[in-house]
């Protein structure tokens, strides 16, 4: 994301209030826009079809979409990080043509694999009539392809086109789903959403093609990166599993869960609160994109190039100090803004809950998971630092710790009762973030010694 971050920081150089608002607004949309737009679109659709659609059909629609998002993230997680690493390596060597050809090849591979997995999940073990299952299958394929597109937007600088694509895609999803619901019936809402997401995919495809397109469209070199960087691929898998393990446990084990048929489960008491709490990620992710990613990436690139040039050790030590300062300043600002947003949402939670008809129990879960989201946003930044400094096995260990802690504590909370819901996510985020912060702080201090000696030296 550094390429976009550099462009956004140019706006900040004007040192005006409007420039700052514009830059952070774009950053929030680029980093958090997909999640916020998807939540907003589904919420509007829920309001639109409420009262005119059977409760069972509404539940099946939203639970189907939730399972599509969950399984698509878990399935494509390893490939997303591998592709990001491959694209970064090729761009460092100025091989733009290889980046685009790997993108096309990755889309082909993802489409075929997601089609096979989707048939098993949503056709064989799905719920609803055949038409609903087929629509869900195609939605799953398109969403998987969109995640791959997101891996490649990291090389783009045309953030306005990126925002425009998501706006068109989610706007089309809402309009088409609403139109089909009105004129064709409730069975066609999923079809409208699927067509809208397909429009989003082609919009992103156009942006990527215009930015890095080439005549060569076949390149499967990235597959060897699974052998070269197995820990990176595993991070993509276990990080997404860690984020969803608490939802799965609530769906499968909670007394409050509801089974809608096939693989579809839901736990409204927990699900609604968690999805709302993740809306708060916008400020922290905006800082992650503008200040942290841009400054840290720039400092890391400068250190790397001077090491390659053979610069004096004193100069390298100064660059290392700049790297540490950039990471600390970025994390501090990110934590401050995220905490401010969290406190604001906790303050307004009672009023929002009364307007939305949310129970006091759901409001309590919402407030607890908000605190968990604060730590998860910081943890994401720490993971990025570990990726940059090539401590992939340590990053993987942190992901496994996050998932294990989230799973164990959530399981205990489910046994203790509804009053404890949400504690698992908050505890897992806090524990893992503290561990990752301690490790990153020590590793950045020993970075030069490790680079030159292949081991840490304590002095």
Image: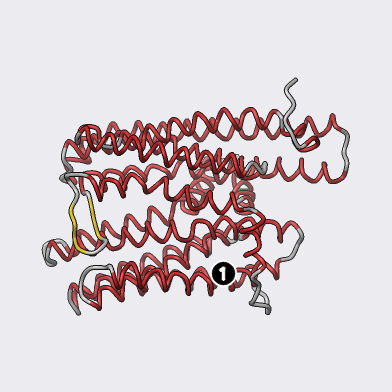
Q: Quadrant of the C terminus?
A: top right
Q: Position of residue 163 (x, y in %)?
A: 48, 60
Q: Position of residue 135 (x, y in %)?
A: 31, 74
Q: Which residue is mark 1?
A: 106
Identify the residue at image location x=38%, y=68%: 140
Q: Quadrant of residue 176?
A: bottom left
Identify the residue at image location x=22%, y=41%: 352
Q: What secondary structure is marked by label 1? A: helix
Q: Position of residue 381 (x, y in %)?
A: 54, 40
Q: Quadrant of residue 143?
A: bottom left
Scheme by which the image is coloured:
secondary structure
Identify the residue at image location x=50%, y=38%: 379
Give the residue at the far top of this rendering. Answer: 459
Residue 391 appears in the figure: yes
Residue 176 appears in the figure: no
Answer left or right for 105 relative to 36.
right
Q: Position of residue 180 (x, y in %)?
A: 24, 76
Answer left or right for 16 relative to 309.
left
């Amino acid at each position: 994301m550094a390429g976009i971050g550099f462009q956004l920081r140019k706006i900040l150089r004007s040192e005006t209030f409007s420039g700052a608002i514009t830059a952070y607004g774009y950053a929030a949309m680029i980093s958090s826009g997909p999640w916020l737009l998807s939540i907003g679109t589904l919420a509007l659709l829920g309001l639109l079809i409420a009262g005119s659609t059977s409760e069972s059909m509404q539940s099946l629609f939203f639970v189907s979409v939730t399972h599509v998002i969950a399984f698509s993230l878990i399935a494509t997680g390893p490939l997303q990080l591998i592709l990001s690493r491959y694209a970064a390596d090729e761009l460092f060597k100025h091989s733009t043509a290889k980046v685009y050809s790997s993108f096309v090849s990755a889309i082909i591979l993802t489409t075929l694999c997601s089609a096979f997995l989707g048939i098993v999940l949503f056709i064989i073990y799905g719920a609803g009539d055949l038409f609903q299952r087929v629509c869900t299958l195609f939605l799953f394929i398109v969403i998987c392809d969109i995640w791959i597109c997101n891996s490649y937007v990291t090389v783009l600088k045309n953030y306005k086109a990126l925002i425009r694509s998501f706006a068109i895609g989610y706007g089309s999803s809402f309009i088409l789903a609403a139109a089909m619901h009105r004129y064709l019936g409730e069975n066609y809402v999923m079809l409208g959403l699927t067509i809208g997401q397909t429009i989003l995919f082609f919009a992103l495809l156009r942006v990527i093609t215009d930015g890095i397109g080439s005549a060569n469209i076949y390149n499967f070199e990235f597959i060897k990166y699974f052998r070269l960087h197995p820990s990176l691929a595993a991070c993509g898998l276990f990080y997404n599993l860690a984020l969803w393990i608490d939802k799965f446990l609530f769906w499968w084990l909670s007394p409050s869960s509801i089974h809608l048929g096939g693989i579809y489960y839901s736990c409204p008491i927990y699900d609604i609160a968690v999805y709302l709490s993740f809306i708060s990620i916008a400020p922290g992710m905006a800082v992650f994109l503008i200040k942290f990613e841009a400054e840290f990436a720039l400092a890391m690139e400068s250190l790397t190039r001077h090491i390659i040039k053979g610069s004096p050790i004193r100069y390298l030590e100064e660059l290392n100090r700049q790297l540490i300062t950039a990471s600390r300043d970025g994390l501090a600002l990110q934590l401050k803004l995220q905490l401010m947003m969290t406190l604001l949402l906790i303050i307004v939670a009672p009023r929002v809950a009364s307007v939305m008809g949310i129970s006091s129990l759901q409001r309590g879960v919402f407030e607890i998971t908000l605190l968990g989201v604060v730590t998860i946003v910081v943890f994401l930044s720490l993971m990025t630092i570990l990726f940059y400094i090539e401590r992939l096995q340590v990053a993987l260990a942190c992901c496994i710790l996050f998932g294990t802690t989230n799973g164990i504590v959530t399981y205990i909370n489910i046994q203790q009762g509804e009053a404890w819901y949400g504690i698992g996510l908050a505890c897992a985020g806090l524990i893992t973030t503290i561990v990752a912060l301690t490790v990153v702080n020590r590793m950045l201090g020993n970075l030069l010694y490790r680079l030159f000696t292949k081991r840490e030296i304590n002095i």
